Image (cartoon, rainbow, N blue to C red):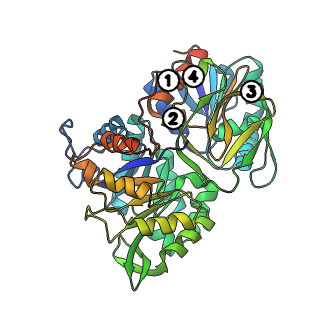
């Protein structure tokens, strides 16, 4: 069972639908205890970083996520969920994140349109089981105004060019993250989700 | 590099597609889910569904339809038509829509833009601007183009950006339905005035019009209805035309 953390930050249902389409056993939950039963966890989300962290804390979901990762279960952060994996964010002030990956979240500078919205290519920096079967340079769907800066280069799986390169996917042990929306990225996104499910041994 | 987007738009009445979509491959051309799946197959980047009846009675129908569409397609889609409250937006997003498009309500209650943006994120708040020229200036119209609002278009575009919109869907009422090309000057003037993505709408007659608005018109995306619905061109054909001329598009070819 893949558990999708539903903390009221939108778009969670799209992730559930995408997993159902590939035949994965998945559910939405806001209950920290359910994370213990999961084979793997997805942290989705759109919206504001600070508000999202507050909601995770209110449901003790922050601690449950850290616990889940420590037991070796795969975790996939998507979009805002990806940014929440990092230590801190400078989105409208300063906010502390889950700290599962060292690094911070910053705003795109001037000179590009914000949000970064639409299909952009993802260029690999190293091979990963997450992108197995997806050709380098494939387009994925993005919709975000902030980007992550991992403290360690080794964490970067892929980069994307938007007024300069930013890290669009990371992996640190069993923690994975993608800035794009695999659930909205047609066939290529489907392959990424299938790969994640395989990691969780649910498909 | 970020790709330019091609966005087919479907008008919905009740739970049916209107304005005669005619795909040979579809047994039921009025079925929104079937049309959505077909457009995804053709390589559409996103879809827009406009509820053209948009009464309180049909609101529930649309919410259910959104869930059906979200269950079947894996590209983003926007829902518009008669959206006027945070609660209504919440219901549509919760049902599976990726973005909502606000038009008349944005003009009459502009604080809705900021409220929605704060709660759901700017990326899901599209402000639709219907523009018509007159007295040498482009003015905003509401109520499906039926009522002038006496606001200058570029000024309004800047205001919606400040208020927290994530995208602008700009329709030229003058060009809409004429298939003689988008209004490139209007589109460029808005695209240059704001740092939000701008979707051009109204006037597509063929791939060359889409090329023109994405290049000279400086649009980030082009929305079209009839050229796709009647099968004059497929989305794939338009993208091929653009790619041959050096426009970055997602052909959806690269995969495995």
Q: Residue at x 20, y 52 (%)?
A: B20
Q: How many marks?
A: 4
**Which chain is indicated by disc 4?**
A
- Disc 4 from disc 2: Cα separation: 12 Å
Across and down, in percent, residue A74 comes to 67, 21
Q: Which residue is mark 3?
A: A155
Q: Which residue is mark 2?
A: A139
Query: Image quarter for residue B50?
Result: bottom left
Instruction: Name the mark on residue A131.
Output: 4
**Which chain is indicated by disc 1?**
A
For residue B248, side relative to residue B194 (left or right): left
Residue A4 against residue B166 in the figure, above or below: above
Q: Residue at x 49, y 69 (%)?
A: B189
Q: Can you say which quadrant of the picture contains the N terminus of chain A?
A: top right
Dot 4 falls on a residue whose secondary structure is helix
Within-10-Å neighbours for mark 3: few <14, some 14–19, many 20+: many
Within-10-Å neighbours for mark 4: few <14, some 14–19, many 20+: many
Q: Which residue is mark 1?
A: A191
Dot 1 falls on a residue whose secondary structure is helix
> Which is more toward the observer, A48 or A171?
A171
């Amino acid at each position: 069972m893949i558990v999708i953390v539903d903390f009221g930050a939108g778009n969670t249902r799209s992730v559930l639908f995408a997993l159902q389409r590939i035949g994965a056993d998945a559910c939405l939950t806001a209950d920290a205890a359910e994370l213990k039963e999961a084979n793997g966890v997805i942290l989705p989300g759109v919206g504001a970083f600070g508000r999202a962290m507050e909601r995770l804390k209110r449901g003790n979901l922050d601690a449950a996520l850290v616990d889940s990762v420590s037991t070796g279960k795969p975790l996939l952060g998507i979009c805002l969920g990806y940014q929440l994996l990092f230590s801190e964010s400078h989105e409208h002030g300063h906010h502390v994140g889950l700290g599962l990956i060292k690094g911070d979240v910053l705003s795109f500078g001037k000179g590009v349109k914000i949000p970064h919205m639409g299909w952009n290519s993802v260029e690999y920096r190293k091979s990963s089981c997450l992108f197995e079967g997806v050709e380098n340079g494939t387009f994925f769907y993005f919709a975000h105004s902030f980007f992550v800066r991992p403290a360690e280069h080794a964490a970067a799986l892929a980069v994307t060019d938007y007024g300069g390169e930013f890290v669009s996917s990371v992996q640190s042990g069993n923690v994975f993250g993608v800035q794009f929306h695999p659930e909205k990225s047609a066939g290529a996104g489907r392959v990424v989700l299938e790969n994640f499910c395989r990691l969780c041994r649910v498909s | 590099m970020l790709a330019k987007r091609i966005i087919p738009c479907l008008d919905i009445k009740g739970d049916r597609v209107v304005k005669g979509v005619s795909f040979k491959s579809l047994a039921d051309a009025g079925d929104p889910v079937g049309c959505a799946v077909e457009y995804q197959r053709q390589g559409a980047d996103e879809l827009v569904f406009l509820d053209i009846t948009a009464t309180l009675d049909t609101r529930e129908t649309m919410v259910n339809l959104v869930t059906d569409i979200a269950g079947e397609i894996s590209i983003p889609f926007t829902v518009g038509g008669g959206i006027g409250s945070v609660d209504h937006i919440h219901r549509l997003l919760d049902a599976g829509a990726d973005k909502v498009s606000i038009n008349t309500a944005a003009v009459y209650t502009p604080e809705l833009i900021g409220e929605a943006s704060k709660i759901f994120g700017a990326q899901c708040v599209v402000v639709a601007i219907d523009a018509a020229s007159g007295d040498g200036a482009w003015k905003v119209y509401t109520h499906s183009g039926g009522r002038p609002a006496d606001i200058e278009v570029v000024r309004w575009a800047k205001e919606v950006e400040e208020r927290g919109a994530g995208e602008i869907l700009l329709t030229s009422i003058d060009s809409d339905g004429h298939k003689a090309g988008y209004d490139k000057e209007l589109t460029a003037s808005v695209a240059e005035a704001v740092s939000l993505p701008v979707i051009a709408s109204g006037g597509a007659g063929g791939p060359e019009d889409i090329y023109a608005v994405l290049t000279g018109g400086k649009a980030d995306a082009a929305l079209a209805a009839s050229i796709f619905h009647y099968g004059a061109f497929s989305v794939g054909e338009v993208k091929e035309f653009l790619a041959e001329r050096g426009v970055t598009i997602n052909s959806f070819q690269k995969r495995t």
